[in-house]
Amino acid sequence: MQFPKWVLLFLCLCDVLLAVLVAETTMTTVAPMAPVCAVEDRASLLSFKARIVQDTTDILASWTGTDCCNGDWEGVTCDARGRVTSLQLQRPEKNSEFFMKGTLSAALGNLHFLEVIVISGMKHISGSIPESLTSLSHLTQLVLEDNALGGTIPSSLGHLSSLQILSLSGNHLTGQIPPTVGNLMNLLQLNLARNSLSGPIPQTFKTFPSLQYFDLSSNKLSGALPDHVGQFKNLTYIDLSNNQLSGPIPISIFSLPKLLDLLLSNNRLTGNIPVQIEGLKSITTLSLSGNQLRGQIPASISKLQNLWNLNLSRNGLSDPLPTILASHIPSLLTIDLSYNNFIFETVPDWIRNKELSEVHLAGCGLKGALPTFRKPDSITSIDFSDNQFTDRISSFLTNMSSLQKLNLSNNQLKFNLSELKLPNVLSSLDLHSNQISGSLSNILNSKTSGFLEVIDVSKNQITGIIPELNSGLGLEVLNIGSNKITGHIPSSISNLGELIKLDISRNQIQGTIPMSVGALVKLQWLDISINSLTGKIPNTLLAIERLRHANFRANRLCGKIPQGRPFNVFPVAAYAHNLCLCGTPLPPCRETEEWKRKTKQ
């Protein structure tokens, strides 16, 4: 049977429309639905929020509404089923104004699908780590660093078999590291630094085949360094510094092929530096300072091709240094051999000829003229303090255009401050305890760099007056004590608005204490003792609320001590040997005619 053409055309059109409708229906059916927050997970999050009594970050202010998975709840991430898998609450900036105050709710343990917990930098979250966290079997990251958590580390954390990152650093945790942490075989990072943990490093720390980052620094750990640390062949970072660890350094540590940073400073380690140190093929930073190491630096250290930073200071190492050629340790940038038993007399040629950024050789028996360097423009920091250098200051600083820190204190340098040509980027200048003469105006004038933060020229033979001080200076420390400086304290002292420490003691300064000193509101240390100052201690100084130390002793001051903290709680010795100071902490003022006459002088 044949149909008219218009019927066939109509049937074709119907087929097309049907296909379109089916396609639209299919698309509507398979379109993914946004996950809706599980009721129990929302309840657990709100329980956490309820235990936070103050939140200046305003993160938790976004936790409103019934759906915690719609993207509006800051720090919360869900899976397709509406189960919370990640809780990440981090302080927006390193600013003291941002924090959370409260405790961690045990309800966090009810978020059974959590894989990541990061609650860091909140500073005032205290209390203990909830035991309930150990029920989070999917957890791969537990980061609770830089809070105020106390108590001990729950031993049950060792049940979190999926954990890859455990960081509890920067809290107030005490007690021993639980041996059960050694059960976490999947750990990549372990960071328990900056707490008050004590006792030994657990012997159970033998089964970390994938561990890359190991930081237990700044605790009170004792005992020996475990030999099995050398079994963690994937380690790139070890920091066990600032503890009370003792005994020799295990030779096994020097067989870690991927290790980049080895920091063992400020412990009680003994013995020699092993010759096997050459096994650290990838090492970039080696710090063994502040221990009780003896013997000589092994010649094998010259084979560390990737070493950037070497710090062996404050040990008992002795001469001679190994022969190191120009081609040895080619990557070296910083070196610190200070305060050992070295008597170099002169800076070793291989140090002078390298392109270094930091050279610290304090207390190394150096004598005579200051050295010259082949690449002076690369140096940013020099510490030659506690040696016996005598001269050549002007040529020493030639071409040191990058120098930021210079410490030549406690030498026998004799020069006039007019010979000193300071680099423009210098931030710290320490020349105390030498035989330097001249006037302060040579280093404090209109050309003084705004970068300069520290000037210490105390215990020298500097004369003249304190010059007028220009605005724009960034000085935080000014120590000119124990010289022969005369004149008055200029009222322009108030231009040093960043000053934290001011010491003008043991000079011959006269006149009164200017009221403008009260404008130094950041001041924490003030010493104007043993001069010839007269008049009162101005009440304007009460504006310096951060002051922790003050000394007005042995002047000719008179009148009532400012009656407010901290001046009325400083010890009596801070005001002793003056003309007629009175008021707390000294006896009350008696307004006799003689007292009135003296206070007007």
Image (cartoon, rainbow, N blue to C red):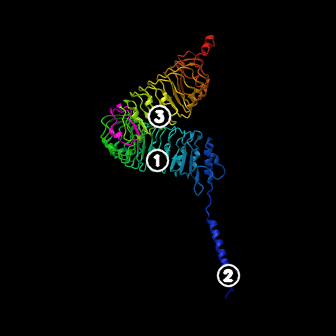
Is 385 on the left or on the right of 1, as rendered? left
- Between label 3 and label 1, give the one nearer the viewer: 3
Residue 524, x across and y down, in percent: 54, 29
**Which residue position holds label 3?**
428
The quarter of the image holding the C terminus is top right
Element at badge 1?
strand
Query: In front here: 496 or 399?
Result: 399
The reply to whether residue 588 is visible in this rendering is no
Of the residues shown, which amino acid type is indicated by label 3?
Ser
- Which sits earlier in the primary sequence, circle 3 or circle 2? 2
Q: Amino acid at mark 2?
A: Leu
N-terminal label among 1 and 2:
2
Please name the residue shown 46% across and 45% down the image. 190
Q: Quadrant of the N terminus?
A: bottom right
Asked if the stretch drawn in magenta spans residue 367, the answer is: yes
Element class at badge 2: helix
281 vs 1: above or below: above
Residue where numbered disc 1 is placed: 189
Q: Using the image as rendered, state which of residue 584 and residue 127 is in the foreground.
A: 584
Visible residue check, residue 587: yes
Image position of 233 with respect to 591: above or below: below
Residue 536, image quadrant? top right
Q: Position of residue 481 (x, y in %)?
A: 48, 24
Residue 110 position (above or below residue 576): below
